[in-house]
Amino acid sequence: MAQVGLDLLLPPQPLDRRGRAGGAGLPAEAWTRIAFIEQPTCPGCSLPFEHDMGGLACPACQARPRAFARLRAACVYDEHSRDLILKLKHADRPDLAPLFARWIARVAPELLTEADALVPVPLHRARLLKRRYNQAAEIARPLGRLAARPVWPDVLVRRKATASQGGKSGAGRRRNVQGAFAVPEPAQARVAGRRLLLIDDVFTTGATAEACARTLLRAGAAAVDVAVVARVREGPDLTI
């Protein structure tokens, strides 16, 4: 049964193309390098805690309440998970998306159960033309199939071609995405009263997730949760 559980998380072929593949898909050494997030974590943003905090949120969530209700992240964004995520994002490897969908399904079962629909964080059309696919949508589609939930890639659009968030401070990231997202008028009736699960690859400062959640809530969504492949630890930013 343990092997079956691993196979649900990792497909039966090597994905990082280094070493011999184990039964779970990634070579054994690659599997051990991924820092999967386990409890205890912040109930608001999934920040890993060293000790159980009795349900208390992290200082950042306490100081500045989030627009989204809850966030779940499958693993820590570090040099090991970063390699796989950037392959999906920039190296034409959408075949990695089902792997990440399984990781998210493992850590966010209650968010998936309660969601009326999954909403991928959108790309601006100029970036979409250049990249040819939206990595968040590629993750959301197999995740929707796993959870038997609809995926709505058209209810949230990025109307402003923002610069990359990489290297920016938290304040700089918030300014960069200010006014960047919108819910098209034809989609507002679908969004109204729904609990939506926003899907993205990486959570850094939360600026993008916050901007998307506020936009969906203004359009009438009942609540917005967030699920991502990885989140950074507190500390220096990583280029994404």
Image (cartoon, helix red, strand yellow):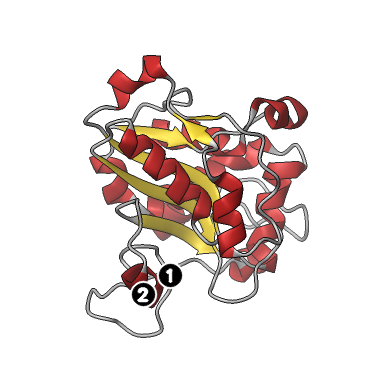
Task: Tell me which numbered mark, 2 or 1, is placed earlier along the sequence.
Answer: 1
Q: Position of residue 107 (x, y in %)?
A: 38, 56
Q: Position of residue 103 (x, y in %)?
A: 48, 52
Would residue 22 be visible to someone looking at this image?
A: yes
Along the line of sight, the residue nearer the viewer: 95 or 44: 44
For image coordinates 30% across by 65% down, the residue present is 43
Binning the other alpha carbons within 10 Å of mark 2 as few (below 14), some (14 to 19) or many (20 upward) gives some
Find disc 1 in the rendering and name its residue.
47
Pointer 2 and pointer 1: residues touching (CB < 8 Å)? Answer: yes
For image coordinates 77% across by 42% down, the residue present is 91
162 shown above or below 237:
above
Label 2: element kind: loop
Say what amino acid the circle numbered 1 marks: Leu
Left or right side of 215 for 123:
right
Find disc 2 in the rendering and name its residue.
58
In the image, which is nearer the foreground, mark 2 or mark 1? Answer: 2
Say what amino acid the circle numbered 2 marks: Cys
